[in-house]
Amino acid sequence: MIVRFPRYSPRRLAALVAIVLLLCLVAGLGLAVLERKRSALLRLDMRAAAGRLRAAPLLPQGLGFAGRDRAQAQATFVWTMRRATAERRLLLERLAPMPANGRMPTELSADLVVSGPQQDVLALVQSLESGTPLIRFAFWRLSRTGPAETAVRLEARAVGWHEG
């Protein structure tokens, strides 16, 4: 069996070779740019790990929890949620501060479980999320607590930020 290859003119061959070389050049340039960006990111990560890079604030001044250190800001964060719950006469089942996150040292978080009338629980959520300093819920779940239609339980992870 004889295999016959199509005949290409010298112009076609030159054009195909030029296209292949151009594609190789573009790929090489893309890889060079990627390597430069990767090394710049590595240098930035090394500076941050060594503590020579100051973290940019996540929020404008005044929207985070102020304090000398993280522990004081965490205490203010927990007190704010405890006070808001008491003002609405809700049952605070659990309020457990979470330990510091190494990747986000300014983040304050706590697990919150509250139950009571639906209207009061929703008012609590609205007041915490619209108040100052800022508190957001990373995740939350509302469920019924009993046969009464208006009794609900809120299970949530509240998140605030330390200004420091």
Image (cartoon, rainbow, N blue to C red):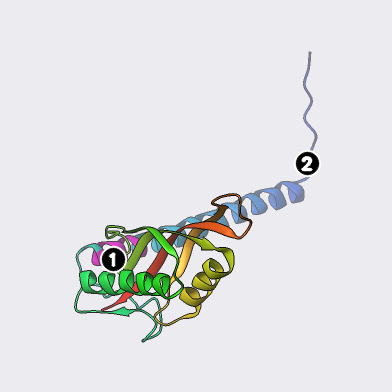
Name which quarter of the figure residue 73 lies in.
bottom left
Q: Badges 1 and 2: C-beta atoms under 8 Å apart? A: no
Q: Position of residue 91 (x, y in %)?
A: 42, 62
Specify start and end residues of the magenta stretch as a single range. Answer: 40-48
Q: To which residue does mark 1 refer?
A: 105
Q: Quadrant of the N terminus?
A: top right
Q: Residue at x 45, y 66 (%)?
A: 90
Q: To which residue does mark 2 refer?
A: 8
Name which quarter of the figure residue 38 lies in.
bottom left
Give the amino acid at mark 2: Tyr
- Seen in the picture, residue 86 relative to 112 is either above or below; the reply is below
- Seen in the picture, residue 142 relative to 124 is either above or below; the reply is above
Q: Closest to the observer: 46 or 123?
A: 123
Query: From where the camera sits, is residue 157 visible?
Result: yes
Q: Which mark is residue 138?
A: none
SS at mark 1 in the image: loop
Drawn side of residue 29 relative to residue 148, left or right: left
